Each structure stands twice: as structure tokens, then as C-alpha cells.
Amino acid sequence: MRARIDKLGLDLPFIFHAGETQDHGSDTDTNLFDGILLGTKHIGHGFSIIKRPLLMKLCKEWNIAIETCPIINEVLGLCPTTKAHHPILLSNCVPCTIISDDPGSWGASVLSHDFYQALMGSNNLSIPGLRVIAEWSIEHSCMSSDMQEKVYKDFEEKWFVFCQWIIDAYG
């Protein structure tokens, strides 16, 4: 499939939903291998990857991001709190993003709920850590390089304003 896409000169990134389970060794768990070997750009959920150090290492080396979904992982019972998953990925320098999976199903309309849960759910995640996750979100998006540059510039400007607000309000 990838060879045909390349031959046609298309830019069609593979993005797989894999590893949304606690059932280590199941088909849902082992599809992480398939996604990585097929050259995915990032993996949706990827919850069970934290039990597979080799796959985390490959994601780090091959720059494959893992989408973390703090609220839905807790709702689905994949983890008892939002303290598991993205902190493990971050501590292993595995690119990860925070997304809001099916936000309409629980009445959310913005991503900030998941970022808030990620920040409050971990004693080790700080404002700079959230910045890294936000930057990885831009880097691993499916936007063109030009669009990524524009978005990153806009992010930089807004980040500066946000940090200044924190200093003014709490410093």
C-alpha cells in the first residue's frame, strides 16, 4: 500500500488507532506492531504501548507520536486516574499529544478539559511539559509544512501572552 501511495506521488500519512486496551497480548494490543511497521505518523490511543518498552523505543527513534486521551481513558476504565499514560511516555521521551476522544459523548466542546486533567492528574507534569506536548501536536499534525510554521508562530505568540498572564496573575 505504501509503495503504491509513494509511486502515485501522494502525501497520505498513515494514522492508526491501536492499543486501546489493557489486555496485554490481545489482537487489539498487538495491532500496535502493525501500525508502527506500516509507517504510521501517529497512533490514536496507543494506551497499551506503555507495557511494550521496545515499541516505545521505536516510536521515539522513528518520531511516531502517541495520542493520549486522559478523560476517555479514565471513563473506559483503561486507567483509574489520568496519572497513567502520558507521564510514562513523557518520561521515556516518546512524542505524545493530548486529544479529546469523542468529546461530544460526554458533553465537552473544547480540548482544554483533557489538558486540565493531564496537568492536574500528574505531579510531574508542569507548564513546560504541556508546552512540549502542544509543540508535538503541531509537529505531528497532518498540516503542510507551511501551515505548521504559521501555526507554530501563532502558538509562540499566544504562549508568550499566556506565560506573561501567569506571571502577572500569580508571580
Image (spheres, helix red, strand yellow):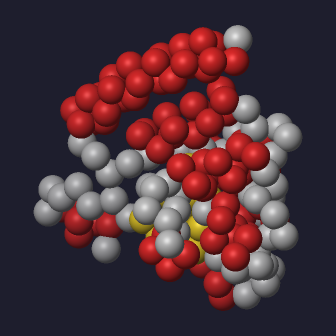
* Residue at the image position 69 percent from the left and 70 percent from the top: 73
* Residue at the image position 46 percent from the left and 18 percent from the top: 161
Pick the quarter of the image with the C terminus.
top right
Q: Residue 41 versus residue 108: which sits nearer the camera? A: 108
Place of residue 82 in the rendered image (x, y in percent of width and height, measured from the top left): 76, 59
Task: Kindly indicate the quadrant of the structure image that contains residue 79.
Answer: bottom right
Task: Kindly indicate the quadrant of the structure image that contains residue 23.
Answer: bottom right
Query: Seen from this angle, which residue lies furthest front?
Result: 169
Place of residue 42 in the rendered image (x, y in percent of width and height, measured from the top left): 49, 57
Q: Residue 143 versus residue 159: which sits nearer the camera? A: 159
Query: Seen from this angle, which residue lies furthest bottom?
Result: 27
Place of residue 127 in the rendered image (x, y in percent of width and height, measured from the top left): 66, 29
Place of residue 71 in the rendered image (x, y in percent of width and height, measured from the top left): 65, 65
Q: How many circles with numbers are drawn on the protein?
A: 0
Q: Residue 77 versus residue 169: which sits nearer the camera? A: 169
Task: Kindly indicate the quadrant of the structure image that contains residue 93.
Answer: top right
Above or below, 79 against 67 in this view is below
* Residue at the image position 53 percent from the left and 49 percent from the top: 112
Pick the quarter of the image with the N terminus.
bottom left
Tell whether 88 sits left or right of 62.
right
Tell whether 143 sits left or right of 97.
left
Above or below, 56 against 81 in this view is above
